[in-house]
Image (tube, rainbow, N blue to C red):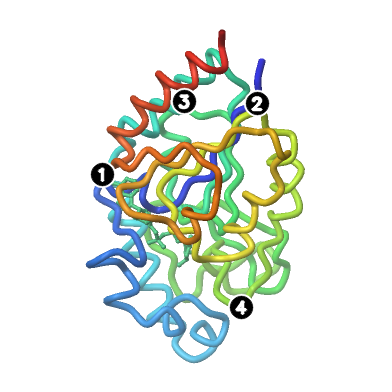
Amino acid sequence: MKKLVVLSGSGISAESGIRTFRDMGGLWEEFDVMEVASPRAWEMNRSLVLRFYNERRKALASVHPNAAHTGLAALEKEFDVQIITQNVDDLHERAGSSKILHLHGELKKARCTVNEEEVCDIEGWELKEGDLSSGGYQLRPHIVWFGEPVTAIEEAIPLVNRADILLVIGTSLNVYPAAGLINYKRHDVPVYVIDPGEPQGIRSMKVTFINKKATEGIVDFIRMVKTNDLS
Ligand code: APR
């Protein structure tokens, strides 16, 4: 089976009702990223950070995967599909995708503030002061904050390099190292981009640009990729 690697961002979840970051009305219009998503924020105002992620986790319980998520899951019948997502929601999982790498963490998980290898599921939607790891230390959101290393990038790079087809969907390609993954594809590998806007630097790339929302663009993509790459 041909390897289809998908680099997704918040835009794929927009039509499920989850806010993006840099669009009009995006999260970073309302919150100062350094006050809710950085190690210093955790040191200075732990309750605000916990509240920011608790509210997003609570909202996640009332949204559902959309046709873009389910379309990608269905492609597993014809392709070896590897999702590499910048999203911390679980919509790819709930849509049925089986191979998902979260570059920036997972909203529904927590990790020990001392032993970062210790990761656990959050029961319900609230992570509170006093929720402790097995070692007795405060649990924190299992999210990669600004200024922290994206350790999963080391696993993502070889996955992109082995791709036969690369799909970029719903990301502004503003944030590195995730945005740099596209440079690790082999030179002859076709790149498709689905986005109603114009991701960073896309004009300088040789791509098939489907300038549509995820749920509409996925239909075009599936038709194209089945015609071009299954024949
Ligand atoms: N369908 C597809 N794409 C969409 C849709 C939609 N319905 N709506 C918006 N988009 C596109 C926007 O045009 C934009 O290109 O999704 C992208 C969203 O970009 P950002 O808000 O920058 O989100 P993202 O690229 O995922 O951000 C990357 O930045 O703040 C950090 O950790 C955070 O993982 C996040 C990272």
The amino acid marked with disc number 1 is: Glu
Would residue 158 be found to the left or right of residue 211 on screen?
Answer: right
List the residue tagged with mark 1.
15
Q: Which residue is mark 4?
A: 147
Which residue is drawn at the image coordinates 71% and 48% (left, top)?
184
The image quarter containing residue 58 is: bottom left
Residue 90 image position (x, y, % from top left):
44, 44
Look at the picture and state if 149 lies above or below 217: below
> What residue appears at the point 55 percent right and 38 percent down from the top-left corner?
191
Q: Is residue 122 visible?
A: no
Identified at 49% across, 21% down, the residue is 225
Marks 1 & 3, CB-CB < 8 Å contact: no
Q: CA distance from mark 1 to mark 2?
A: 26 Å
Quarter where residue 98 is shown: top right
Question: In the displayed structure, does residue 174 sit left or right of residue 100?
Answer: left
Q: Amino acid at mark 3?
A: Ala
The mark that comes first in sequence, 4 or 2, is: 2
**Mark nearer the viewer, 3 or 2:** 2
Spatial CA span between label 1 and label 4: 29 Å
Please give the residue where the numbered disc 2 appears in the rendered image.
3
In this view, the mark in front (1 or 2): 2
Q: Amino acid at mark 4?
A: Gly
Q: Nearer the viewer, mark 4 or mark 2?
A: 2
Q: Which residue is mark 3?
A: 73
